[in-house]
Image: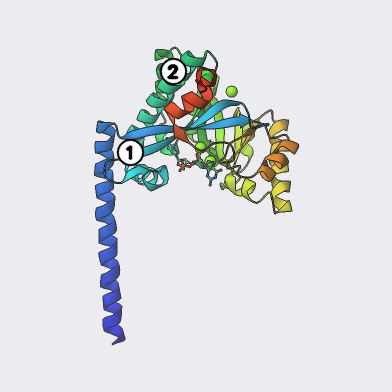
Amino acid sequence: LSKSKGRNRYEFFSHAIEEQAIEKRRLIEEMRIALKLGQFVLFYQPIFDQCGINATKAEALIRWNHPQRGLIGPNEFIPVAEENGLIEDIGNWVRGQAIEDAAYFYQLSGKKMQVSVNTSPLQIDHDGLWVDEWILACNKHDLPRDTMIIEVTENTLMDPDSPVQQQMQRLNHYGIDIAIDDFGVGYSSLAYLQRLDIDILKIDRSFIKHMDTNESSIALVRAIITMAHNLKVKVVAEGVETEGQHQLLKQLSCDYLQGYLFAKPMPSKDFIDQYVTPTLLVTE
Ligand code: C2E
Ligand code: MG
Ligand code: MG
Ligand code: MG
């Protein structure tokens, strides 16, 4: 009996695995089509100063406007795109769209609204083309290069001998800001902070989340901010959801705040209305 049971279970699992593989292939095929048909969109989440009033930066966050499934978040497709190389095409699209949007924001308001773009380590090639394309795209839109921020995770910068380091240095040399995303949860050492000219640390949401209730979370956030400021690096707190967290972060001199307490990611049109040209809003 147990033998046949085991066999059934095996068949059940192998069936499930096969279905997963089919599902994944379908997703990949659909992503290719999505790129061609323009189904990807960038949402923008404003990043505020300490008081939570003025937004001078915004993070571009990809969404997929799927014809059947509706709006899909990046966690559902970016990992698959990274697995099979499609991340390169998607990343190129994100760069082009984000720069176009940033140029438009700049044109509309006459002020610099920094746009922060997420980058997968797999997009950063070793021969420097990736950096060249960033520079070319900024030039094409007459965009001051310090309007753009590139977000990478710590793991991207872990290996001091990796050519990625050199590419990041070139980016920085050209004036594009570098932000470390999800700071504190990677397996990285801190050595890269000395090697590279980092502009911004984004403290991972998991630390911010427990600040209201957990003394050690506060201690960690305080230590990160102190270290960053000593290195002349600015700090963004990610995932600020409560007024309590906001007040604590203000006390700790956190430079910038991002989170649902202030605003959720939104379509670029809404972002423009609320944060790029707010004075042009007609009040009825
Ligand atoms: P991330 O870069 O750490 O982005 C922040 C995520 O936290 C976003 O999720 C945002 O919507 C969410 N968030 C912001 N404030 C709050 C808050 O107060 N509470 C909570 N619970 N969440 C908050 P999203 O848009 O689903 O993006 C998830 C991840 O997908 C991003 O994490 C980033 O790693 C990746 N991603 C997004 N867009 C792109 C892209 O264009 N290219 C690449 N390679 N990755 C992207
Ligand atoms: Mg990010
Ligand atoms: Mg710099
Ligand atoms: Mg993050």
Say left or right for 52 vs 230: left
50 is higher (above) or lower (below) than 210: above
Dot 2 corresponds to which residue?
104
Observer-nearest of 100 and 133: 100
Image point 69% across, 28% down: which residue? 232
Numbered disc 1: secondary structure:
strand
Q: Amino acid at mark 2?
A: Tyr
Q: Residue 147: give x, y in percent of width and height.
A: 52, 20
Q: Residue at x 28, y 47 (%)?
A: 27
Measured from the top left, where is residue 115 in percent x and y?
Answer: 50, 26
Residue 257's disc is none
Colouring of the image: rainbow
For label 2, the crowd category at 10 Å Cα-Cα, with few meaning under 14, some 14 to 19 and many 20 or more, is some
Of 58 and 190, the residue lying toward us: 58
Q: Are marks 2 and 1 in contact (CB under 8 Å)?
A: no
The residue that disc 1 covers is 65
The count of marks equals 2
